Every structure is written in structure tokens, then in C-alpha cells.
Amino acid sequence: MEARPSFRGLRYFEPERDLKLRCRLEAMEAGDPIEIDTGGEDGVITYRRAGRLRFRIAGQGCQLTVFSLVGYGGGLFLPFRDGTSGKETYGGGRYLFDTVKHTDGLALETRAGSPEVGIDFNFAYNPSCAYDARWACPLAPRENWLPVPIRAGEQSFVEEPSA
């Protein structure tokens, strides 16, 4: 609350056309549930693997696992880290979509009857814990660490000094 008067807005990379992609959503074995203890009010959040996205960025093969939330409102969730994490963007990674919070309409595009989806990294955003240590967030698992920098979407939050 005390930071609100000095808040100047969030910082974003310039939109990058090459980071709006069409890729195939491949079915995958859900496997054992993944439980992440947020350490906060949300407690333990349980996920299952829902599918895998494969794509290329700057000639490099990449893949991300899409998770299905078990409980906690359900929905799909896609956290990721990349070559900008901890430098230009939040160290714990960013989210591309979280359907329980209705952020999917901007970054996830599907076409009826098609196994392809559109993802747009220009809509990548920081988890709540990037703004305040009181928030606890599920972060990107190792399988969702991309080998390339994604200079699109939201940058690191920089708190302005109080006046």
C-alpha cells in the first residue's frame, strides 16, 4: 500500500512478432501427481502433466510441459524459465497462461479440431511472488526451463524508491 503513490507501472519488452508461435500440443502420460507446497495460504497445489508443446525459437528446439491443476479451481497452467530469468525477468520464471485466473484468452489460442495451439510469449507475466514476499507461487519445474532467452512479455518488477 505504501508503495502505491510511487508506482510508475510495469515494464515490458517491445512486442516480438517471432515469439507468437503455432505449435502442436502433444498428449503425454500424466504420470504421478506433482505437489508443490507454496508455503503460503494456498498450501499444497497438485498438478498433472496435460501435454507437451514443441516449437523452435531462433533455430533452437524447445519444449514446455502444460500442466493441469487438480483442485484449486482446475484449469491449465504453463510456468517457464528462460535465458532472461534472474537478469531481465523474475528469477523464478514467468507464466504464459493460467486458465483458473482467466489469463488464457491472451496467450493460448486453439482452433476447433486442430491439434495445434497458438502461444504468444508477448503475454508472459510474473507470478504474484515477484511483487511481494508474502505471496507464495508455484514456480517453473526444471522440465520447463528453456535454453533460449525469451525477450517478450513482462520484465522484472523494479520498485521505485519512496519519495
Image: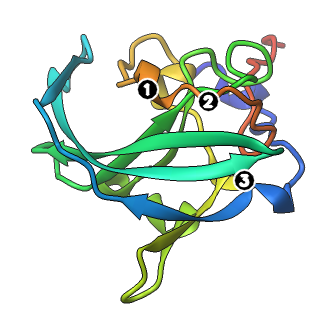
Q: Quadrant of residue 1?
A: top right
Report x, y in % for residue 71: 10, 44
- Quadrant (top left/top right/bottom left/bottom right) for the C terminus: top right
Q: Secondary structure at mark 3?
A: helix
Q: Earlier in the sequence, mark 3 or mark 2?
A: 3
**Mark 1 highlights which residue?**
143
Does the residue at mark 1 contact the one at mark 3 (Cβ under 8 Å)? no
Indicate left or right for 50 with 1 as reference.
left
Q: Amino acid at mark 3?
A: Asn
Indicate left or right for 63 with 50 as reference.
right
Q: Nearer the viewer, mark 3 or mark 2?
A: 2
- Which residue is pictured at 89% across the width and 49% down the height? 14
Q: Secondary structure at mark 2?
A: loop
Closer to us: 78 or 9: 78
Q: Secondary structure at mark 1?
A: helix
The count of marks equals: 3
Q: Would residue 140 be seen by someone viewing this image from the given angle?
A: no
Q: Earlier in the sequence, mark 1 or mark 3?
A: 3
Disc 1 residue crowd, few under 14, some 14–19, many 20+, Cα 10 Å: few
Q: Amino acid at mark 2?
A: Leu
- Which residue is pictured at 62% across the width and 52% down the height? 55
Report x, y in % for residue 47: 20, 36
Q: Amino acid at mark 1?
A: Glu
Report x, y in % for residue 65: 40, 41
**Mark 2 highlights which residue?**
146
Disc 3 residue crowd, few under 14, some 14–19, many 20+, Cα 10 Å: many
- Which mark is on residue 134? none
Residue found farthest to the right: 14
Q: Coloring scheme of the render?
A: rainbow
Report x, y in % for residue 105: 49, 69
